[in-house]
Amino acid sequence: AQSVTQLGSHVSVSEGALVLLRCNYSSSVPPYLFWYVQYPNQGLQLLLKYTTGATLVKGINGFEAEFKKSETSFHLTKPSAHMSDAAEYFCAVSDTGRRALTFGSGTRLQVQP
Amino acid sequence: DADVTQTPRNRITKTGKRIMLECSQTKGHDRMYWYRQDPGLGLRLIYYSFDVKDINKGEISDGYSVSRQAQAKFSLSLESAIPNQTALYFCATSDRTSRETQYFGPGTRLLVL
């Protein structure tokens, strides 16, 4: 079975600082990997995804993530945090049969002025 | 107009009552999903459907049932609600061309007293 581990349920950064949200996965086949963002009282919105090809993936709002097979990681980064980035972020992996997603437990990002 | 809609957005019910949450989509996708979100647990898959005649249990289907009335409609029922079904429920859609990307509705917040 697939699984996703997000280290740190809460991350706090200062405005303008680097954002690093960690995600490790387990998968018996080449995975499809996703990062979603959830703003307060809203549904989930796709930030970026990795399927095949280039391992550095760029998403919306200046976020990017790098697929590292040897480390089974897919960490999310943004060079400079903005107040509007405060939200909950979820990493997800597609299952073996490409039929459904398995989500991590989420990381709540707080941005301090 | 939103592509994925959920009704109701908020619901309070009592233990033992039967309730139905509804999801409709205008994206033309063939795949639909129901998840529940609990703090610290991320999103967990309840049921998913790849077409009207293909319905599958997710990891936490006990106590729930679903109906795929049409390609665009997927309903989730709680046959006899219990307090630990208090959660935020999300519907999502995808299709085979979207490389497993799922598009989420705004959620239904359910409180079982």
Image (cartoon, helix red, strand yellow):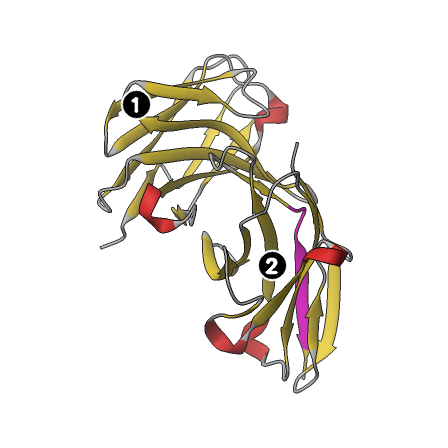
Residue type beneath disc 2:
Glu
Q: Residue at x 74, y 60 (%)?
A: A10
The verdict on residue A2 being magenta is: no
- Determine if residue A75 is in view: yes
Q: Residues within 10 Å of mark 1 (few under 14, many from 20)?
A: many
Image position, residue A78 (x, y; %): 62, 77
Q: Residue at x 56, y 37 (%)?
A: A95
Task: Please indicate whether residue B4 sits to the left or right of residue A35 in the image.
Answer: left
Element type at mark 1: strand
- Determine if residue A9 is in view: no
User: Which range of residues does the magenta coloring cover?
Assistant: A104-111
Mark drawn on residue B68: 1
Count of marks overlaid on the render: 2
Residue type beneath disc 1:
Arg
Q: Residue lying farthest bottom?
A: A16
Q: Main secondary structure of the magenta part?
A: strand
Q: Residue at x 54, y 20 (%)?
A: B61
Task: Please indicate whether residue A39 sits to the left or right of residue B40 in the image.
Answer: left
Mark drawn on residue A88: 2
Task: Please indicate whether residue A2 sits to the left or right of residue A58 in the image.
Answer: right
Q: How far is mark 2 from mark 1, CA to CA?
A: 30 Å
Image position, residue A66 (x, y; %): 63, 67
Q: Residues within 10 Å of mark 2 (few under 14, many from 20)?
A: many
Residue B53 sits above or below residue A17 on the image: above
Quadrant that contains the C terminus of chain A: bottom right
The verdict on residue A108 being magenta is: yes
